[in-house]
Amino acid sequence: MSLESLTPRASDAPGTVFIVDDEPDHALIARHVLRGMAPELEVRVLSTIEGLARELAVAPPGSAVLLDRLLGGVESYATLREVAAGRPDLRFTLVSAWLTPEEAERAREAGAADAAQKPANLDGWRTLFRGMLGLV
């Protein structure tokens, strides 16, 4: 067990995290890092944009969502906008292998709390999740 997993969560940290990525390796790495940091969290992995809005519409209150910008070649901004409008309690972080400042702004305008380039290493994933989840 790592020292990071013993670090207390912020009181407003979510109980459920959705990882939405169509690249199985990226989703597996993100889930592995997150479970190592906060094993008490429920982590759900989704891989397609089809049915995503419906799945997130019934997500536990206050869930966090790590959302890939491109899912199966389809940009996820419209789905982000739709879900965020109906579920303002969900906290979205949009990620992409390549993210311009304009795309990051577009993500925030669609309802994301943050947008970031996908991390290139495990420490980068840990840093992303610390910020996303309010882990200390």
Image: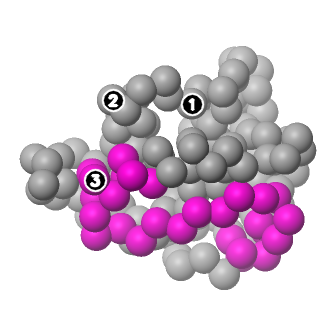
In three-dimensional space, the C-alpha distance between marks 2 and 3, rounded to whole angstroms, equals 12 Å
Residue drawn at 46 percent across, 66 percent down: 43
Q: Earlier in the sequence, mark 2 or mark 3?
A: 3
Residue 110 picture location, percent across and down: 77, 45
Q: Which residue is labeled 3 in the image?
A: 36
Disc 3 is placed on an element classified as helix
In the picture, measured across the screen, residue 70 lies left or right of residue 33, that is: right
Crowdedness of circle 3 by 10 Å Cα count: few (<14), some, many (20+)?
Answer: some
Query: Is residue 98 at least partly visible in the picture?
Result: yes
Residue 14 picture location, percent across and down: 41, 65
The image quarter in which residue 5 lies: bottom left
Crowdedness of circle 2 by 10 Å Cα count: few (<14), some, many (20+)?
Answer: few
Q: Which residue is labeled 1 in the image?
A: 118
Q: Earlier in the sequence, mark 1 or mark 3?
A: 3
Q: Which residue is labeled 2 in the image?
A: 123
Residues shaded magenta? 31-57
> Is residue 41 rendered magenta in the image?
yes
Give the label on residue 108, or none. none
84 up-or-down from 125: above or below? below
Disc 1 is placed on an element classified as loop
Residue drawn at 28 percent across, 64 percent down: 39
Residue 59 picture location, percent across and down: 60, 76
User: Mark 2: which amino acid?
Assistant: Asp
